[in-house]
Image (cartoon, grey):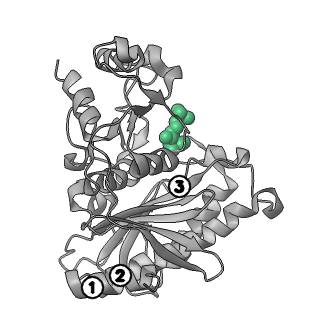
């Protein structure tokens, strides 16, 4: 069978599921931007782009040169096409306004341009995470797009995905009709469909958490992780393996590929924060992908996609992956 490129997949989705042409165009533009980011990331030290900018983003995190470069690539690729009403990014305090000389469109694009960037200098997989929302009807308003237009629960996403820059560059995508994986053919410059209708196994024997934070966790997480570590002799009656890459895209990609449970719980280090990861451009897109692949995603007490955002950069606790373990970890929070 001839290879199905991303473009062909999107055209066929349009025919079978009436995917709007400007959504198809949006995905194509984001994919092209991810190819450019992949190219910049792969240069490493040869590209003079490793290391930090000496600045901090709105999260108070040190900005890597590639964080800023990746952010600019996505903005420049998307601002002129007429498919977006605005953009928001981990790297920018406020919503990005489409410049006046360009037409505006129906969608909002929210992204983490380079997730896991602390791993770049040590050559570990990183990625770009993106989420697509419809822009609410502006009732003829013409001024700047306010943050409130973006504050929609994850159930409102019309598309979500990530690119992972690893041994292969892959694009994982859902338009709400399952999860598809595309591998970048660098010779042709095309993303080629290599993984159709990805499914997360319902059960797993592998979990991912940063164990160094154990003393800071709340009681339900302490109990649950101790049971995982107790293995066959413990209440769960089986041995578990552990992975922690400290790059959400890489950890989630493993879970989409072979199952598992990813956890970043809230902890006592910053009790005023509900977690470390960001809702709008990390947890929501990843949760849509995981649910579309048959998995589950909660913040310990509720489905992540149901959370009504209150601010653009708000954080959230994350338990996502194989349904059986997400449900168990969540049940322990019910007391
Ligand atoms: P820690 C990367 O900075 C990130 O946002 C996620 O990609 C990753 O899962 C997490 O933080 C790692 O956090 O505290 O283990 O360094």
The answer to the question of whether label 2 and label 1 lie on touching residues, with beta carbons closer than 8 A, is yes
Q: Say which residue label 3 marks.
A: 91
Above-or-below relation of 268 to 52? above
Earlier residue among tags 3 and 2: 2
Residues at marks 3 and 2, CA–CA distance in whole angstroms: 29 Å
| Residue matched to label 1 | 14
Mark 1 and mark 3: Cα distance apart in space: 32 Å
Q: Nearer the viewer, residue 160 or 227?
A: 227
Q: Nearer the viewer, residue 261 or 259?
A: 259
Q: Does 63 sit left or right of 231 as displayed?
A: right
How far across and down, in percent of the image, does residue 19 sit?
Answer: 26, 81
* Circle 3/circle 2 CB separation < 8 Å: no
Q: Nearer the viewer, mark 1 or mark 3?
A: 1
Secondary structure of the residue carrying tag 3 is loop
The x, y position of residue 92, in whole percent, is: 50, 57
Task: Name the residue at 31% across, 74% down.
Answer: 107
284 left or right of 193 in image: left
Instruction: Look at mark 2 in the image and give the residue it sits on.
Output: 10
Determine whether 21 is above or below 143 in the image.
Answer: below
Residue at (39%, 18%) from the top-left corner? 231
Q: Residue at x 38, y 32 (%)?
A: 205
**Quarter-of-image position of residue 260:** top left
């Amino acid at each position: 069978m001839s290879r199905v490129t991303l473009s062909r997949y999107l055209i066929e989705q349009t025919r079978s599921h009436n995917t709007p042409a400007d959504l198809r165009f949006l995905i194509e533009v984001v994919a092209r931007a991810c190819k450019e980011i992949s190219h910049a990331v792969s240069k490493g030290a040869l590209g003079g782009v490793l290391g930090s900018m000496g600045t901090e983003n709105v999260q108070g995190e040190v900005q890597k040169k590639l964080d800023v470069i990746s952010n600019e690539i996505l903005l420049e690729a998307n601002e002129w096409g007429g498919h977006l009403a605005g953009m928001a990014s981990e790297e920018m305090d406020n919503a990005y306004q489409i410049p006046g000389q360009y037409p505006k469109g129906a969608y909002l694009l929210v992204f983490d341009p380079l997730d896991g960037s602390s791993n770049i200098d040590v050559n570990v997989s990183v990625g770009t995470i993106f989420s697509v929302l419809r822009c609410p009807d502006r009732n003829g308003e013409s001024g700047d797009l306010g943050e409130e237009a973006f504050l929609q629960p994850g159930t409102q996403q019309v598309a979500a995905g990530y690119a992972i820059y690893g041994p292969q560059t892959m694009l994982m995508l859902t338009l709400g009709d399952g999860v598809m994986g595309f591998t970048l053919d660098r010779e042709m410059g095309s993303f080629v469909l290599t993984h159709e209708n990805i499914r997360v196994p319902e059960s797993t024997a592998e979990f991912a958490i940063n164990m160094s934070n154990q003393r800071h966790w709340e009681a339900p997480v302490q109990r649950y992780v101790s049971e995982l570590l107790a293995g066959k002799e413990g209440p769960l009656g089986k041995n578990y393996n552990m992975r922690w890459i400290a790059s959400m895209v890489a950890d989630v990609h493993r879970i989409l590929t072979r199952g598992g449970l990813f956890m970043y719980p809230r902890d006592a280090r910053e009790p005023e924060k509900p977690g470390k990861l960001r809702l709008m451009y990390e947890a929501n897109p990843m949760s849509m992908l995981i649910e579309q692949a048959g998995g589950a995603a909660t913040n310990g007490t509720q489905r992540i996609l149901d959370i009504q955002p209150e601010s653009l950069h708000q954080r959230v606790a994350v338990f996502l992956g194989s349904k059986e373990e997400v449900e168990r970890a969540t049940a322990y929070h019910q007391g």
